[in-house]
Image (cartoon, rainbow, N blue to C red):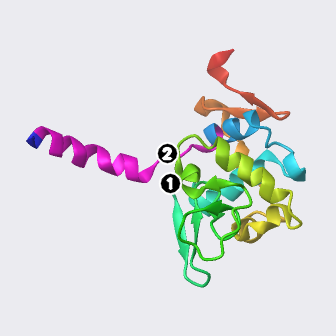
Amino acid sequence: MKVLILLGLVFLPMLAHGKVYERCELARVLKQNGMDGFGGNSLADWVCLAKWESDYNTKATNYNPGDQSTDYGIFQINSHYWCNDGKTPDAKNVCGISCRDLLTDNISKAITCAKRIVQDFQGIRAWVAWRNHCEGRDVSSYIRENLMSGICLFLNKTVFHPRQQ
């Protein structure tokens, strides 16, 4: 019994924090899911957005007392418009998903919903963090790593891992 409690105390923080992506890992997943150029936005724009919205954390949440909504997941998708958390008053659920689905390590549903959001009239400007930290700035550093690091490079929009040659 004591062993189970100890294991629970060791592993519970890992579950609560979710997956925190590395920049290149996130860029690779986003590229594989068609985000490079989607809605006229570069891969670097999406990685910059995720940095400033959630610090690349899939379990990030942020409560908004004004409209009693919550932002969920790596893209901080809002429960008032885009997902259903069962507690936000007058929620629209435009993406047709549970907000819990935005808190998993598999971000495919978050990507699908983000694609739906940018098809709206505001596009990527719907995200305040993108407007405040990414818009009008050189965001290329979000998808570039040092060749010597051995992690990854983006050359001509191609994911490249030096050790996989």
Q: Is residue 15 above or below residue 150?
A: below
Q: Which residues are magenta?
A: 3-24
Residue 19, labelled with which disc? 2
Whether the magenta-drawn stretch holds residue 13 is answered as yes
Q: Position of residue 35 (x, y in %)?
A: 79, 43
How many numbered marks appear? Answer: 2
User: Looking at the image, which residue is at 85% across and 33% down?
Assistant: 156
Please tell me whether mark 2 sits on a helix, a strand or a loop: loop
Q: Position of residue 125 (x, y in %)?
A: 81, 67
Q: Position of residue 92 (x, y in %)?
A: 71, 68
Three-letter code, disc 2 = Lys
Gap in angstroms between the C-alphas marked 1 and 2 = 7 Å
Three-letter code, disc 1 = Lys
Q: Quarter holding the C terminus?
A: top right
User: 154 and 102: which one is in front?
Assistant: 102
User: Looking at the image, which residue is at 76% across and 49% down?
Assistant: 44
Badge 2: how crowded within 10 Å, few (<14), some, or many (20+)?
Answer: some
Q: Position of residue 139 (x, y in %)?
A: 77, 55
Main SS of residues in magenta: helix
Q: Are marks 1 and 2 in contact (CB under 8 Å)?
A: yes
User: 122 and 152: which one is in front?
Assistant: 122
Along the horizontal axis of the image, is 27 left or right of 74?
A: right
User: Looking at the image, which residue is at 50% across and 54% down?
Assistant: 59
Residue 59, labelled with which disc? 1
User: Which badge, 1 or 2, is on the more N-terminal residue?
Assistant: 2
Query: Residue lying furthest left in this view?
Result: 2
- Which corner quadrant of the image does residue 85 belong to? bottom right
Along the horizontal axis of the image, is 165 left or right of 35?
A: left
